[in-house]
Amino acid sequence: METLSDTTWDVVIDGTGISQSLLALALSRSGKKVLHMDSNQYYGGSDAAFSLDEAQEWVEKVNKDTSTSLFKDASIFKLDASPLNEDTSISPKLASSRAYTLSLSPYLLYARSQLMSALVSSKVFRQLEFMAVGSWWIYAPEQPDSKTGELGAEKVLYRVPGNREDVFAATHISMKSKRTLMRLLRHITKSKEDEASNEDEDMSMPLNDYLASNFNVPEELHNPLLSLSLSQLSQQDTPASYAVPRIQRHLSSIGHLGPGFGAVIAKYGGGAEILQAACRASAVGGGVYALDTQINDCLWRTGSEHSEHPFLLNLGNEGSVQSKYLFTSKKMSHTSKEGSTPLVEIARSISVVSATFPSLFPVTVEGAPVPATAVLMFPGDTLDSPKSPPVYLQVHSSDTGECPHQQSVIYCSVALAGPEGQALIESAMDRLIRAEGFPARVLWSLRYTHSGRLGNGESRHVTAEDGVPNGYVFPPSSLDLAFEDDTLDLVKQAWKRVVGDEVDDADFMMFDDRDGTSDQ
């Protein structure tokens, strides 16, 4: 049986996150011999998805390996046994471990994103099932967008308008504010030919100042517009240069893949499912995969006899392999260049809830699919913390394949680390659960701190190792709530480092059908 050391590799990629997996696919389809490996026993790294038992194992590993992990302070909480006076026949319970697929990467994928285009051109989309992301909601208990007597979470939330019809149908927005909002939306969505008129705008100012000074947008509409950008910073800390293009992305994506929605998530784990589909397609193209395999030692060899394959990588029990290029997410030496953007820490949680939140998933346009995801934003001031950033909740129905029927999975994120961030998440969850009422309960919750790069509009880059030609390091994972276009830009940079002028840039992620990737 041929071993890994029997082959000389063009490229070794260490780590199976979303960026590395897309790179492996692109290179294998460009005719390169690719060895794609991961020290974990599962695919995905910081983008993985887990069953309940696997999540427990992950927590134990995170808390043991605190020096190199992007995660820390991980813990799991479970609902206590039912009180003695409660009817246990109707008491909600967890299903078996494998009935759940809980993702570390539940990111939204906009219809007009580069990643969506690449999934289509590479034919990977055929291995995926996408579910529509529906409405955006703002927590505002004093200003709900619901009828008197409405039951459920909707009584403390109002829906963010997604189009002209939504704007004029909204009962919580005055007619004057509606006209102002429409003027802003027309400005944001104007064609590229008309964008020259925007060049004089000061886009460096905070979003709230931009909205107020340029368009007289009332304060009541600032949070809804902030939510459409998915910025995890407050209005004052979010520059217009970041928010406005993302609001434009949101609006321009609506209707592109079908009526009534502009973003999707991949069924069965979001980003974790996308990266596994990319790995499967890479294997069809000749890529070789090795899990539970790590680089114990990396030797860069000089001399003409090693010019084609200068890397000698010791893989422990798998022996040593030779390669021309090496891509990793870990520094190979103490002299590695640090990224220009410092890491930040944010608090996150994943909760299994015994409720379906039907009011959060309305079909707002005739012919639109029933959404499987809703996005909720809790402004800091509504959680008795005016200076805090917003808390985002993504409510996933069982249609996502992540949980059994009659349950939901809620992904929470706030740009504050530690106990302070988790307290805000718990406060937001408590308000939602109390508003929904019985039988809504948190049955199981994973809480953790995640380190990475919080989007600020700057592009990420693969960095070269000092003194190690052909050795490159991927930047830390993004903490954004949607796949940003720089995800694919990053992959293309790395791909170009290897293929050079051998392949035309236009051929990047443009593949013909092969066995294993067609509809049949």
Image (cartoon, rainbow, N blue to C red):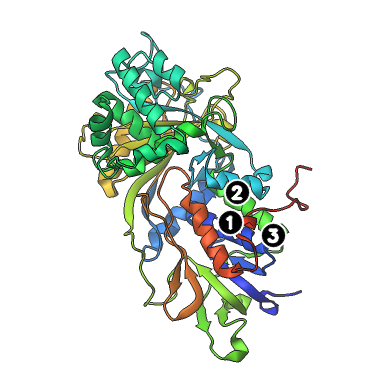
Q: Quadrant of residue 410?
A: top left
Could you tell which of marks 2 and 1 lies nearer the N-terminus? 1
Mark 3, residues whose alpha carbon is within 10 Å: few (<14), some, or many (≥20)? many
**Residue 348 shows in this picture:** yes
* Alpha carbon distance from label 2 to label 3: 18 Å
Residue 422 location (% of width, % of height): 31, 43
* Mark sitting on residue 22: 1
The C terminus is located in which quarter? top right
* Alpha carbon distance from label 2 to label 1: 10 Å
**Residue 429 shows in this picture:** no
Residue depicted at 53% across the width and 29% down the height = 261
- Secondary structure under badge 1? helix
For label 3, the residue is 283
- Secondary structure under badge 2? helix
* Mark sitting on residue 149: none
* Mark sitting on residue 118: 2
Q: Quadrant of residue 233?
A: top left
